Image: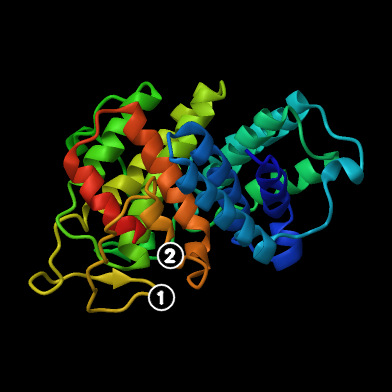
Amino acid sequence: MDRRLLEEGLMIIVSSREHTGDLWHAHYGAAAIAAYFWVRENRLTSLAAGSVTAEAKAMLRKHGVHSGEPSLRGEVLPMEEAEALITQALDRTIGELHWVGHQAIYGALSLKAIRELEGWGTARDVQQLVELMDSFERTVPGRSWINTTVKEIRTLRVDESDGFPHIERPEDLSRLILDELGAFDTIYQAEAHHDLIGHMLTYGHALNILYELGYPSLFHQGLTPFLTMVKALRLSRNVDHELDRLTLQSPVDRLPLVRAERSIALPHELEYWLTDRRSQDWNSGHVFKFPFSFYHHARNSNSVPESWENFRYIIA
C-alpha cells in the first residue's frame, strides 16, 4: 500500500479550513485514508485493489493541497502527544450530534492514519486538526431530514421505548447498524435519505475505530448522539412518498423523492470501478468511505441479505 494516501489525506484534513474556509474539503482527505485501509483490510482481487488505489490517487491529484510532507516543514510531534491532543478535542464535542458525526469521522480516521504512520505532523498540523474538531461545537445536527426538523432533533431523546439493544463493544454497534440498514423498505436518492443512511455507516464505524485504537470512553460517549441520528432516520424508514404525507427539510432535496439507483456490482468487484467515478467527483469521497465502513460492519457481525441489498442503493 502507498502510505502517501495517508500522508496526503491527513494534510487535506488539517488544512481544510485554511485552504477552503469550511469543514468539507476534509472529505477528500478522509476518503484517501479510507481507501488505504479498505484495500488493506479486505480481500480484494489485485485488479480491484489497483483500481481503488488508482482512483484515490486521481482524487488526490485534483483535491490535494500539494504543500509538501509535514516532516519537511518542521519537527514531527511524537505520536502519543498528537493522539492526546486530538482525543481531548474529540472529547469536547463527541457527546453531541453535530453535522451527522463528521467530527468523529475526521478525528477517528486521522488517529488511525497517524497510528499507522507511527507519528505524523508538526505541532502546527495537529493544532489545525484540533481547531477543525473544535469548530463543530454548537453546529447543527445536520441539514437535511425527512419527517423531522433540526429543532426537533435537538430535543430528541433516546429511551427504552426505542428498543435499541445494549451496546458494549464494536460488534454490538455493527450488528445494530446492519439491522437498521436492512430494515429500509425504499431508499431515496436524497441527501436526507441515501446520504444520511451512508453516514450512519461511517459515523458508527468512526466510533468503532476509536474503541479499537484504545479509546472506549470516546466510543461510549458517542453512542447517544449516534443513536439519536438513527432514531431520526427511523422516521423515514417505511415512507412511500406517493402514498404517505411526509415533510422534507433540506436546502438541496426536493419533492417528489426519486428512488436511488441500484448498483449491479459491489465495491470489492472490479466491475464496480469500471463505472466512471471521476465525473461525479467520487461523490465527495464517499465512494471510498461508504464501502470501507460497510465492509467493516459486515466483518464485525453476521450481515443479513437485506443489508447487502440495501447497501447497493447507497453506493450506485
- Reading the image, the residue beneath label 2 is 143
Pointers 2 and 1 in contact (C-beta within 8 Å): yes
Kind of residue at disc 2: Arg
Residue at 51% in and 39% down: 39
SS at mark 1 in the image:
loop
* Image coordinates for residue 224, horizontal then vertical, percent: 39, 37
Q: Quadrant of residue 275?
A: bottom left
Residue 98 relative to residue 56: left or right: left
The reply to whether residue 154 is in sight is no
Residue at 72% in and 33% down: 85
- Reading the image, the residue beneath label 1 is 252
The residue at the far left in this view is 243
Check disc 2: other Cα within 10 Å, few if <14, some if 14-19, many if 20+: some
* Image coordinates for residue 238, horizontal then vertical, percent: 14, 57
Residue 278 relative to residue 299: left or right: right
Observer-nearest of 298 and 226: 298
The residue at the far front in this view is 47
* Image coordinates for residue 173, horizontal then vertical, percent: 34, 31
Check disc 1: other Cα within 10 Å, few if <14, some if 14-19, many if 20+: few
Instruction: Give the answer, above or below, for where 249 lies relative to 195.
Output: below
Task: Check the image and tell me how it is coloured.
Answer: rainbow
Kind of residue at disc 1: Val
Observer-nearest of 13 and 45: 45
Observer-nearest of 82 and 218: 82
Of the residues tagged 2 and 1, which is closer to the observer? 1
Q: Quadrant of residue 88?
A: top right
Residue at 53% in and 30% down: 210
Q: Looking at the figure, which quarter contains the N terminus?
A: top right
